Image (spheres, rainbow, N blue to C red):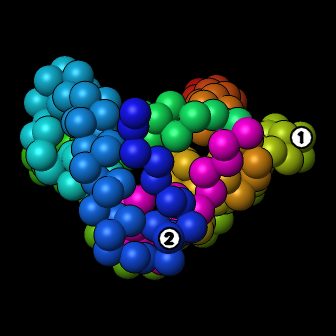
Amino acid sequence: MAQEIDLQALSRGEKSAWDAFVRRYAGLIVAAVRGLAQQEGGDVEDLVQEVFVRLCKDGFRLLKTYDPARAGLSTWLTIVARSTARDAMRRRRLALTPIDAVPERLLATDSAPAEKLKLPEGLLSPRQKLVLSMLYDQDLEVAEIAAALGIDPQTVRSTHHKAMLKLRSHFSTEEQ
């Protein structure tokens, strides 16, 4: 029978609980990120490390958001692992973009602070505005936003995607 993990002891930072957690779920997390790493050319070990760091950073803040009423721990960890790996690979891709590939307009040397965009009233829903603010102004991760709003991480991603489509559409017609 599988050993049960004491989430309270884990969130208090007890080393024995953390060691048991890592022994129990490392294989699951490796499996969750392996497919993404192979598709995107990422290093599995680095991505697994990112997942564990994210789970324990800020006093185990993310781990404390786990709700057994919403999903099993294995399911939740798989989602967190894939999301973290995807975010890490996206950050690395952005950091490795050759300067020649960046459009000239994005390399402007004007050091004046960027002004906030003024959007027409009603272009974005209140939830879309909130999600964009949490992602870009507060620099929160998708899982953190989902936990804060009490919604599924996929809902955060979907809301973000729909908001970006609206913004692209609005600004592309405005430029013409």
- Residue 163, given in percent of the width and then of the height, sits at 67, 35
For residue 55, above or below residue 37: below
Q: Residue drawn at (55%, 49%), measured in percent from left and top? A: 143
SS at mark 1?
Answer: loop
| Circle 2/circle 1 CB separation < 8 Å | no
For residue 58, above or below residue 135: below
Q: Where does label 2 land, which residue?
A: 9
Q: In screen coordinates, is 8 left or right of 131?
A: left
Instruction: Report which quarter residue 148 is drawn in.
Output: bottom right
**Cα–Cα span, label 2 and label 1:** 47 Å
- Residue 132, given in percent of the width and then of the height, sits at 65, 51
SS at mark 2?
Answer: helix
Where is the N terminus found, in terms of image quarters?
A: top left
Q: Where does label 1 land, which residue?
A: 122
SS assignment for the magenta stretch, majority: helix
Which numbered disc, 2 or 1, marks the residue that appears first in the sequence? 2
Q: Residue drawn at (46%, 35%), measured in percent from left and top? A: 74
For residue 147, above or below residue 36: below
Query: What amino acid is found at the position of numbered circle 1 in the picture?
Result: Gly
- Could you say which is closer to the camera, residue 123 or residue 69? 69
Where is the C terminus found, in terms of image quarters?
A: top right
- Alpha-carbon neighbours of circle 1 within 10 Å: few (<14), some, or many (≥20)? few
- Could you say which is closer to the camera, residue 77 or residue 25? 25
Q: Residue drawn at (53%, 60%), measured in percent from left and top? A: 7
- Could you say which is closer to the camera, residue 130 or residue 19? 19
The range drawn in magenta is: 53-69
- Alpha-carbon neighbours of circle 2 within 10 Å: few (<14), some, or many (≥20)? few
Task: Indicate yes or no whether the magenta region holds residue 36.
Answer: no
Query: What amino acid is found at the position of numbered circle 2 in the picture?
Result: Ala
